[in-house]
Image: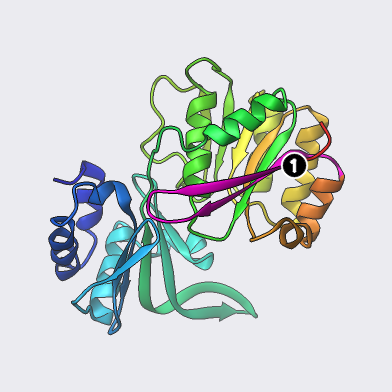
Amino acid sequence: MFSENTENLFLCLPPQIVREVRRISESYTDFEEKLSEIRIRAGRLSSVSLRGRVIPLSVFVTEEQIRDSLKLFCRGSVYAYSESLKEGYIAFEGGYRVGVSGRAVYENGIICGVGEVSSLCVRIPHNIRGAADIVIETFERLEFRQGILIYSQPGNGKTTMLRDCALQLSSGKYHKTVALIDTREELSGSFIGRECAIDVLKGYPKAAGIEIATRTLSPDVIICDEIGGYEEALSILETQSCGVPLIASAHGGSLSEIFSRGSVKILAENGVFGAYIYVKRENENKYTYTVNYSEI
């Protein structure tokens, strides 16, 4: 049996893909818990990922089926999702993010959409209680005054850690007011319950969301995913002048790699982050963490 959210997701996928996923799930007692991605490709191998382990599917889908799935994910109106499609994804109810691959469509030299869609990558969100324990422990050591940057290569659980961090900090013994900047609508999903003191800003660009949260919501901590450009860095620096710590993530395999980016370097030089946590998935059930502290 799958959850209601997963069953709703299945309604948007080609039926032969759903049958294959159900068939494979019969060999596992914890299949849904481990399921992290479903990738469907027109005329090529489709696959599922179970915490990093890729399992090819023995069925194929057509370009027409990909287009039909895209329409279903867009609730019948692809045009309504044109802004996020320019960024290569669709936010689907339940916290799912659907990556979209195809041919870039340009207007005046700027990407304005995607055509000839050939594959969809569905990232499956999970609420794993305890995933952020190392983050919470580190934040406590920083006396909740400085931010934390979680970094790793893609697919190592950063988003899951951020989601659990928001849940832990906003409930239980902490009960801090958390502002969650959910630009791609995959951090909050259906996981934010009544017991959580979380204000969610969905669909906002990170820079705007951070600025609005700082100015109007008086949060104890701001959490966002995948910081990137200079505009975001400047907004983050503004929050620091107001004394609001930030817990965020970035893609990278080493400190030197993330510091090589101008935006992260600016934040580091201004003491935004008191610690940097590297996370690596060793296998389906094991993660390792490396914590590097700035001056405390």
Q: Is residue 169 above or below residue 248?
A: above
Is 291 left, or right, of 179 in this rendering? right
Give the image location of residue 292, x and y in percent: 72, 43
The image's colour scheme reads rainbow
**Closer to us: 160 or 122:** 160
Stretch in magenta: 270-292
Q: Which residue is mark 1?
A: 236
Q: Quadrant of the N terminus?
A: top left
Q: What is the tally of numbered marks visible in this picture? A: 1
Q: Is residue 90 above or below residue 194?
A: below
Which residue reaches farthest top?
173
Identity of the residue drawn at 21% across and 57% down: 10
Q: Is residue 233 above or below residue 274?
A: below
Identity of the residue drawn at 72% across and 50% down: 232
Identity of the residue drawn at 34% across and 47% down: 93
Rendered image quadrant of residue 238: top right
Q: Would you call the spot at circle 1 few (<14 residues within 10 Å), some (14-19), or many (20 or more)?
A: many
